[in-house]
Image (cartoon, rainbow, N blue to C red):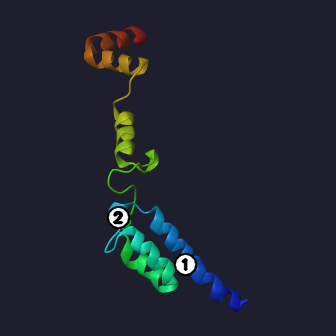
Amino acid sequence: MLRALLFILPLALMIYAFIDCLNTPEEEVKHLPKPVWAIVVLLFSVVGAIGWIVAGKERRPRTGRGAGAGGWVAPDDNPEFLKSLKDEQRGGATGPKADDEDRKKSDPDRERERDEDTES
């Protein structure tokens, strides 16, 4: 079993690096042209694969939450969306109830009259 791992792991690493090299856009490849990197990965198996992973491609740092620069963010992870929900709950509600509340606020005399009518 250990002998198989000594053969399978380097092969898997080489296949991963080769496929990653082929799928990487040309703009993200560093130091050598993309076809040269592919040949290096194939000819020098483990060393070429490690070289590609370490130095061949621009790696973006991982951000904590949400997407990087301008990527899609799920609504429950988007702070702007969550803020808009809170603002909506506080006072930005719309609909029939909001219209009634606006009328009450705009005409306090009518409300006093309603209160007096309900007391008597």
- Mark sitting on residue 23: none
Name the spot of residue 97 as percent of width and height, x first. Answer: 42, 20
What is the crowding at mark 2: few (fewer than 14 residues within 10 Å), some, or many (at least 20)?
A: few
Left or right: residue 91 compared with residue 12? left
Image quadrant holding the C terminus, namely: top left
Mark found first going from the N terminus, 2 or 1: 1
Q: Among all residues in the image, which is located at the extreme right? A: 1
SS of the residue under disc 2? helix
- Residue at 36% x, 62% y: name it: 26
Q: Among all residues in the image, which is located at the extreme bottom? A: 3
Identify the amino acid type marked 1. Leu
- Residue at 60% x, 82% y: name it: 9
Name the spot of residue 8 as percent of width and height, x first. Answer: 64, 82
Residue in the foreground of this view, choosing between 107 and 83 = 83
Give above or below for 9 relative to 101.
below
Identify the amino acid type marked 2. Glu
What is the crowding at mark 1: few (fewer than 14 residues within 10 Å), some, or many (at least 20)?
A: some
SS of the residue under disc 1? helix
Name the spot of residue 115 as percent of width and height, x first. Answer: 37, 14
How far apart, in angstroms, are the residues tagged by discs 2 and 1? 20 Å
Count how many numbered circles sit on residues in the image: 2
Residue 15's image quarter? Answer: bottom right
Q: Check disc 1 and report the residue beneath it.
A: 13
- Mark sitting on residue 28: 2
Give above or below for 105 relative to 36.
above
- Residue at 35% x, 20% y: name it: 101
